[in-house]
Amino acid sequence: EQRRTRRWNMAFKFGLLAYLVVLLMVYLPGRWFESEGDEPHTALVDIRGVITDGSEASADRIVSGLQAAFEDEQTRGVILRINSPGGSPVQAAYINDEMTRLRKEFPDIPLYAVISDIGASGGYYVAAAADKIYANESSIVGSIGVLMNGFGFV
């Protein structure tokens, strides 16, 4: 009787453990199936939203992503996916300058800009540094310009 109880107890514990492992794999799929980066790949860097300092699309974040992509020995190409109405001309210029520098340092790695919904102003300024720009016929593209507000003193 004790043997039978012990077997059921062990089976129950094993089943519970297996259930918890499956739950973890379902809710954290990226952590289990992520590529190790040891195979040739195309890197993807996203620019989403307004390009400003401290935002998701800040020059610091985008430049860090671009540097990591180009410096990875397994990178065969870089895609810059842009969905931005623009933003700070200074931040856009930092990204543009770094893209130009990286293209010179790594001439064998092509850099493509893909504009999804909008690539205007600073977004297009960034895209202009790529080898090629791709956009849908319905995408809003272009209009590099700078708007400067003043205090009314001229």
Image: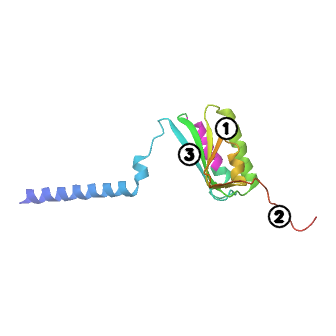
Q: For mark 2, does the 10 Å Cα neighbourhood hold few (<14), some (14 to 19), or many (20 or more) residues? A: few
* Residue toward you, 13 or 154: 154
- Is residue 147 part of the magenta span, yes or no? no
- Is residue 65 part of the magenta span, yes or no? yes
**Residue position marked by numbered label 2 in the rendering:** 149
Dot placed on the residue nearer the N-terminal end, 1 or 3: 3
Q: Secondary structure at mark 1?
A: helix
Task: Give the main secondary structure of the magenta stretch.
Answer: helix
Q: Position of residue 118 (x, y in %)?
A: 64, 56
Instruction: Say which quadrant the N terminus sits in.
Output: bottom left
**Residue position marked by numbered label 1 in the rendering:** 102
What's the residue at 80%, 60% (across, down)? 147
Q: Position of residue 116 (x, y in %)?
A: 60, 53
Q: CA distance from mark 1 to mark 3?
A: 15 Å
What's the residue at 79%, 56% (across, down)? 146
Q: Amino acid at mark 2?
A: Asn
Q: Amino acid at mark 1?
A: Leu
* Residue toward you, 54 or 129: 129
Q: Which residues are magenta?
A: 62-72
Asked if disc 3 and disc 2 are in contact, CB closer than 8 Å, the reply is no
Asked if disc 1 and disc 3 are in contact, CB closer than 8 Å, the reply is no
Q: Quadrant of residue 105?
A: top right
Q: Amino acid at mark 3?
A: Leu
Q: Position of residue 144 (x, y in %)?
A: 75, 53
Q: CA distance from mark 3 to mark 2?
A: 35 Å
Instruction: Say which quadrant the C terminus sits in.
Output: bottom right
Q: CA distance from mark 2 to mark 1?
A: 33 Å
Q: For mark 1, does the 10 Å Cα neighbourhood hold few (<14), some (14 to 19), or many (20 or more) residues? A: some
Residue furthest to the top in view is 108
Residue furthest to the right in view is 154
Residue furthest to the front in view is 137
Q: Which mark is residue 44?
A: 3
